[in-house]
Amino acid sequence: MSSEDFSQFSMLDLFRAELATQSEALTAGLLALERNPVAADHLEACMRAAHSLKGAARIIDLAAAVEVAHAMEECLVAAQRGRLALNRDHIDALLGGVDLLAAIAAGSDEPGDTGEYPADDGRFAGVIAAFLATLDAASNPVSDPPVPLVAPAASAQGTEPTRAPEPRVEAVDPPPSASGASGDSMVRVTAESLNRLLGLAGESLMEARRLRPFHDELLRLKRLQNNTVRAFEHLRAALPVTVEEKAALAFEEAQRQLLQGHLFLAARLDELEAIDRRATDLANRLYDETLASRMRPFEDGVRHFSRSIRDLGRSLGKQVRLEIIGGSTSIDRDILEQLEAPLGHLLRNAVDHGVETPEERLAAGKPAEAVVRLEAWHKAGLLQIVVADDGRGIELEALRAAILARQLTTEATAASLSEAELLEFLFLPGFSMKASVSHVSGRGVGLDAVQAMAKQVRGLVSVASQPGAGTQFRLQLPLTLSVMRTLLVEVDEEPYAFPLTGIIRTLSLAREQIEMLEGRPHFHFDNRQLGLLTTHEVLGRGEPRLDEGELSVVVVGDRGEAYGLVVDRFLGERELVVRTLDQRLAKVKDISAAALMDDGSPVLILDVADMVRSAEKLAAAGGLRTLERRRSGAAAARRRKRVLVVDDSLTVRELERKLLDYHGYEVEVAVDGMDGWNAVRSDPFDLVVTDIDMPRMDGIELVTLIKKDVRLRSLPVMIVSYKDREEDRARGLDAGADYYLTKGSFHDETLLHAVVDLIGEATE
């Protein structure tokens, strides 16, 4: 007898839950039957699923769903009996039936319905008739005369349609409970409640861990007391034999009391150690169980892609199969939900861009059917996800031509870019290698969204390609957003935490390995020169200790832009329970969250992406200040006019910076409108040069804010944008911009002349 209690759910809720489970089985089975139409096990599984749905729909008087499920069952039974040879048209029609069942279940819950027994008012009669006609037209019976699969649609009264005589189908077992095969009862818990519960479990874990340092301190007290006991024994041995009896008795009593206290402390320490073990074990199990409630198998969130990839391939005239590996890998529910759109983009790109047509594949010696692989596994405490195809790969020369066509860099620079540097352009906003926009791709938003999602959850994304063999995208993400593996470092006698996902490498750097390039400190790392700064500079915290031998350096960033950050010392790796900052603080520069240490002390978790942006600005302005002191006095140069360049494109930003820096201006950079707005409010500038299309805050909004600010309204602002239409120019000037240029002006002196017109020569 089942002890499950489903009283809190309506019959329609239970039908929908069962439909979700059986639809997954139907879709998986039908996709398998498309490759092997006579697979007995898949035919049996699909027939049973359709039969179960028919029975469940009949129980709640959902005649429309009964009719659809019955038609699907008839088709599958005919295939089982050998009276019907399944082909792709049948599979298309049956998959359409799965979609139709979902629409019926969703559409029956109208306002005013109780939800207990949904009304069947004939709204789906036309759609069902079309489905039945499609399924019947797709039939290709082996024997004559044809056996009708279904009778005409049910009457408006909702009675079950009559059908041709059929072989009796054996009764099937009742379907598993709506809660799933495991037999666990369903409980409605909001995500917010679950997050609070996980937070409390994390706090209990931290509190339990605080017992260990307390126990260790008492253990130290025990050792001190033991030393005191020994000192008393030595003192007693050193006393003369003729000591007064009264004094000897007092001494022995003190020694006895001390020994008794020592034994009592030892006993309590043993009890405390046992309590510590039990509390820590209980807190760990509570936290693990709570965390497990947030985890879902990877396949739960990606199983539906098998159907969509198959359908997309057919619409493009390609044969594509999705292969899911590591479907049982556990993933945080929030991360799995956020992966929906990025993985959809990557899979659509693989089918549209990467996979060839069957004719092209056969000519290249490949199977006509392409395989797109979606794989997930855990490695080193991180979640690794790979989306790979066995298609044509990325043509680097075509990518180079697309970069030049969009004027993202100069021809000389493009010719010198490595493969890794070229592939990084794929993640730029609005970048696409397709010349035209289709319903599948071409707008250049897919890979940008993938990278944005990865950064949002403190992860990384990379791409690799082999011509003729395919393309692989790899996402490296945290296992959960609630717990973070970090590297603790000390900066100005305070601990800070670097997320491990944002660290490229940690190293000890000898002073002689530091080189000065263009007046700025660099060091050699992975066959390139990286800029070197101190974390103290970035965070504005004190002076670094640079006179104690080798420097402790954390390398952060990505292949596009990376820096070495000097810290005072490494404190080791820690797993921290993340606590979000109070919303009233808004975005704190260079900080993403906070956490509690094992001893209860707080620690700030650094925002690596923000740190890289801050490092870019500092590197442009100077570098490691302790290694490079600026001279002052009469010999100092005249004041250089300061220009702020605001652009989300690294290439454009560097082109503008180098051009202005070469002509004597002091240039600082900002990576988007919000970064630029923070910069102009905190530092004085003579000119702002900004793009329009940027994340977080666009250029028009930045110009508007500057011109509305009483202190900044006189600051000249120049817009430099790809948008060269007259209405775009008017929009920028109306916002208050003093000059409007197109980015095509980079290659001549137009930009420099415009700067001189606005603020004069570089020095005064």
Image: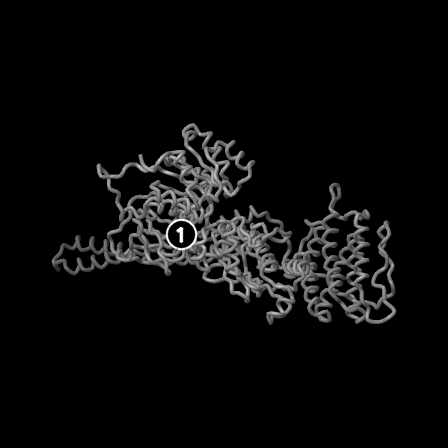
Inspect this view and state whether residue 476 appears.
no
- Position in image of residue 228 (x %, y %): 23, 56
- Position in image of residue 220 (x %, y %): 30, 55
Q: Nearer the viewer, residue 358 or 675?
A: 358
Mark 1 highlights which residue?
498
Is the residue marked by circle 1 packed among few (<14), some (14-19), or many (20+) residues within 10 Å?
many
Q: Is residue 51 left or right of residue 273?
A: right
- Position in image of residue 120 (x %, y %): 80, 48
Q: Nearer the viewer, residue 709 or 598?
A: 709
Count of marks placed on residues: 1
Residue 336: quarter of image: bottom right
Quadrant, the N terminus: bottom right
Q: How is the image coloured?
A: one colour
Residue at 54% across, 57% down: 331
- Position in image of residue 246 (x %, y %): 17, 53
Q: Could you tell me which secondary element the residue under label 1 belongs to?
A: strand
Q: Amino acid at mark 1?
A: Phe
Residue 67: quarter of image: bottom right
Q: Nearer the viewer, residue 743 or 106?
A: 743
Q: Is residue 22 above or below residue 521?
A: below
Residue at 49% across, 58% down: 462
Quadrant, the C terminus: top left
Inspect this view and state whether residue 81 appears.
yes
Q: Is residue 458 left or right of residue 234?
A: right
Q: Is residue 61 left or right of residue 186?
A: right
Residue at 40% across, 52% down: 498
Q: Residue furthest top?
A: 710
